[in-house]
Image (cartoon, grey):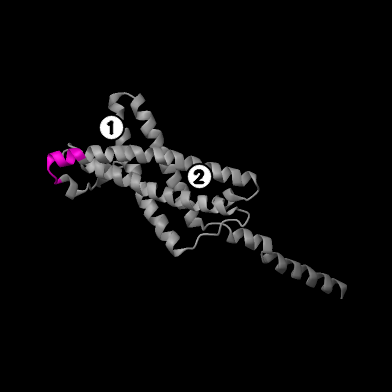
Amino acid sequence: MNLRLRATGQMCKLHARAWPTKDERTTMNDRYTRTAIVLHWLIAIGIIGNIALAWIWPLVADEQVRPMIDLHKSLGITILGLAIMRILWRLSHKPPALPQAYKPWEARTSHIVHWLLYGVIFAMPLTGWIMDSAWKDAATHPMQLFGLFEWPRLGFIMNLPTDTREHMHTLFGEAHELIAKLVYVLVALHVAGALIHQLEGHRGLQRMWR
């Protein structure tokens, strides 16, 4: 009889462990979905890679510059596609709320930086794509996506008069560089905010890490 009671008690404990505790449920609800996490880090890696390429190609031999610029373009188009997927996923999957310990101004700043980051993540590849389509040699130098297949340029820009295309190439090139500087600022704010909140015990990195 005692053996049966002990066995029943052990079974009850096993069943109890199978269900997450309240704290565990809270932690799970505070995390982003796995798809959102993967998209977040793929975009982050792509941005870091493109920034690194832009810093490196002025330092390399001339024959190495064009392949690096082509890789830069391919990464930009990939980031644009991933960003579209990220937005669609966010619209269909509500993100977790910010920790309640955040002060009101911290929450507002976090949301502003977050949406500004979305804006520049779209603006960077779009301005680059427009600039590349307005390039004077675009018609004779097709753009290859990672060397796998030709990626279309924007035909309505390529068909513009030469003077207009040159003006657009300059204009969107300057916009591309200006937005790049904004990316540095926003990424720095995003990373600094995440690290500060992590050090304060808000477990911010865990929300987007696993």
Amino acid type indicated by mark 2: His
Residue at horizontal 58 percent and vertical 58 percent from the top:
30
| Inter-mark Cα distance, 2 to 1 | 32 Å
Q: Residues within 10 Å of mark 1 (few under 14, many from 20)?
A: few
- For the stretch drawn in magenta, the main secondary structure is helix
Amino acid type indicated by mark 1: Arg
160 inside magenta stretch: yes
Magenta-drawn segment: 159-167
- Give whichever of 3, 57 is nearer the camera: 57
Residue at horizontal 63 percent and vertical 63 percent from the top:
25
Residue at horizontal 49 percent and vertical 63 percent from the top:
94
Seen as rendered, the residue at the extreme bottom is 1
Question: From what the image shows, is residue 175 above or below residue 156?
Answer: above
Q: Percent position (x, y) of residue 59? A: 36, 24
The reply to whether residue 203 is visible in this rendering is: yes
Residue at horizontal 71 percent and vertical 64 percent from the top:
17
Q: Percent position (x, y) of residue 28? A: 60, 60
Q: Percent position (x, y) of residue 181? A: 39, 37
Of labels 2 and 1, the one closer to you: 2
Taking 174 as reference, is 46 left or right?
right
Instruction: Choose top left, top right, bottom left or bottom right for residue 84.
Output: bottom left
Q: Mark 1 sits on what residue? A: 66
Seen as rendered, the residue at the extreme right is 2
91 inside magenta stretch: no
Q: Percent position (x, y) of residue 161? A: 12, 43
| Disc 1 secondary structure class | helix
- Give whichever of 17, 57 is nearer the camera: 57
